[in-house]
Amino acid sequence: MRSLECLDGTRVERLVPAANGSRHHVFFGVEAGTGIEVVAKVELMDGALETERRALAWGAAHGAGMPALRAFTRCALPGDDGEPARCLISERVPGSAPDTPDAWARMGRALARLAAIPWEGCGLATLTAETFAAGHHRRATELGERLAPALDQGTDFQKSLVYPLVLTHGDPGGGNYLDDGATVGTLLDWETAHVAPRGLDLARAVFIALIDGRPERAAAVREGYLAEADWRPTPDELRAWLVVAGVQFAHWRWEHRDKPRVRPWQDAVDVLARALNDPERDRAYA
């Protein structure tokens, strides 16, 4: 039976590979001595887990809906004779991926609660309103005419980016949330967590639902977020944030267009264009 032996004495038994990517090996297992079910991430890229460690530690101190951090140490993969790699071990939480509008509404509530947590002192990267607006302007400028089907290049969205800074998940899709059907569930995978203007997490969750062809989930995550949050944005503000998210998706795909398994950037522009031009958008999207 395979196990992870960590330098701090933690041992994870009954390992089952969960997923492997370019940044980590991921396993499900059981913590020896306690019987607690855990998820173990072993770094493939040095330093890739530090952001998640900071986010989980901060969340634990402020009652956030995150997995509990069990250990942040070094370990060697079974059969690997190389140097021990950094390993993050967290509790495995119950739930399943959100597959109904109600589940997406609960994810929206979880994101809104995250935004209410104090962020000063968390140690995560911080994007000020000015830096964030400059990043959006750069992406829109680099995409240039490629965005023409979606929006008027002369439209000024910068003022809509000047919001209070909040703790932000950064990648709030259905693959990074477990729904338990009763509470607000649990947000997972905190490697992109940072501090950014309020509105980013909501916009990205909405756009992820739209690009997956699920407008009913886009509406649900928006409604859940706004029902939980102390924020009453106007339709124009929500429209501006949708543009921000759409430009981010299109720009990332355009930048990585020559890499395998990257979806066409044009799809993101088309989704944004339909969302902005749909006469029902105020009801369905924003």
Image (cartoon, helix red, strand yellow):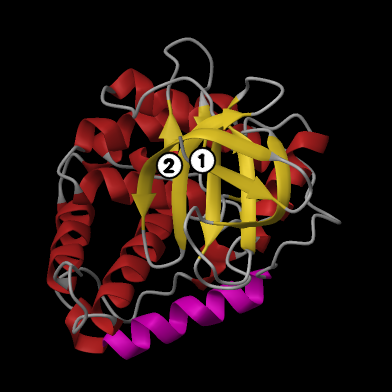
**Tag on residue 188?**
1
Tag 2 and tag 1, C-beta contact below 8 Å: yes
Please indicate, yes or no, whether residue 165 appears anywhere in the rendered image.
Answer: no
Question: Which of pointers 2 and 1 lies earlier in the amino acid sequence?
Answer: 2
Residue ID at (61%, 60%): 49
Q: Mark 1 is on which residue type? A: Leu
Relative placement, left or right, of 106 versus 132 is left
Mark 2 surroundings within 10 Å by alpha-carbon count, few (fewer than 14), some (14 through 19), many (20 or more): some
Q: Mark 2 is on which residue type? A: Asn
Residue ID at (26%, 22%): 100
Quarter of the rendering occupied by the N terminus: top left
* Magenta residues, dominant SS class: helix
- In depth, the one of 98 and 56 nearer the eye is 56
Instruction: Kindly state the secondary structure of the residue where label 2 is placed.
Output: helix
Q: Name the residue under label 2.
A: 176
Please indicate, yes or no, whether residue 286 appears anywhere in the rendered image.
Answer: yes
Q: In this view, does 136 lie above or below 53?
A: below
Mark 1 surroundings within 10 Å by alpha-carbon count, few (fewer than 14), some (14 through 19), many (20 or more): many
Residue 284: percent from left, percent from top: 25, 36
Instruction: Kindly state the secondary structure of the residue where label 1 is placed.
Output: loop
Residue 154: percent from left, percent from top: 33, 81
Relative placement, left or right, of 22 versus 53 is left
Instruction: Examine the structure image and report whether residue 166 is included in the region drawn in magenta.
Output: no
Q: Magenta region: which residues? A: 128-143
- In depth, the one of 75 and 211 nearer the eye is 75
Quarter of the rendering occupied by the C terminus: top left
Instruction: Examine the structure image and report whether residue 137 is included in the region drawn in magenta.
Output: yes
Residue 53: percent from left, percent from top: 69, 52
